[in-house]
Amino acid sequence: MYSTEETVCGKWIDGKTIYRKVIVGKLAEESGNGIVFANVSDLKIDRVINLFGNLIDNTSVAQIMLQTSLNRTNCLFGAVNMFYGNETGNIFYHFLNNDGQYSGCTANVVIEYTKK
């Protein structure tokens, strides 16, 4: 089950409960490195099990899976990859947006984690 509310979705190999939460937010207008998508320090994360998401570009031509690069015929038009910062509790992303198709797009990010 996917929800913007924290839900239990399984057990990790060490027996800890795995939780899942969907976070909805917007990508930046311009390319950048280490952009904060969301602060999730309130979730008390011990280990991130999975971090992924999706968006639809501004022209509704493609649905993009976050954490991957989108390659078109001759060049890289956009790339987003994400990571969780243990010290800050932030989900960060790096964003390459050469032609503006992903500027300000709404993204749905799924984070699965165990708690401290």
Image: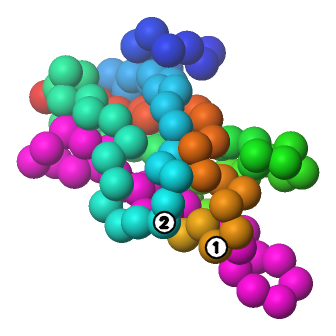
* Residue density around tag 2, few if under 14, some if 14–19, many if 20 or more, within 10 Å: some
Q: Position of residue 30 (x, y in %)?
A: 49, 60
Counting residues from the start of the chain, the first of labels 1 and 2 encountered is 2
Q: Amino acid at mark 2?
A: Ser
Q: Are marks 1 and 2 in contact (CB under 8 Å)?
A: yes
Task: Provide the secondary structure element on which disc 2 rests.
Answer: loop
Q: Position of residue 31 (x, y in %)?
A: 48, 66
Q: Residue at x 83, y 89 (%)?
A: 74
Q: Position of residue 50 (x, y in %)?
A: 46, 44
Checking the image for residue 31, the label placed there is: 2
Q: Residue at x 60, y 67 (%)?
A: 97
Q: Residue at x 26, y 33 (%)?
A: 39
22 horizontally vs 68: left or right: left
Q: Identify whether 18 is placed above or below 92.
A: above
Q: Amino acid at mark 1?
A: Asn
Q: Quadrant of residue 37?
A: top left
Residue 90 inside the magenta-drawn segment: yes
Span colored in magenta = 70-95
Q: Position of residue 44 (x, y in %)?
A: 17, 26
Question: Dot 1 corresponds to which residue?
Answer: 98
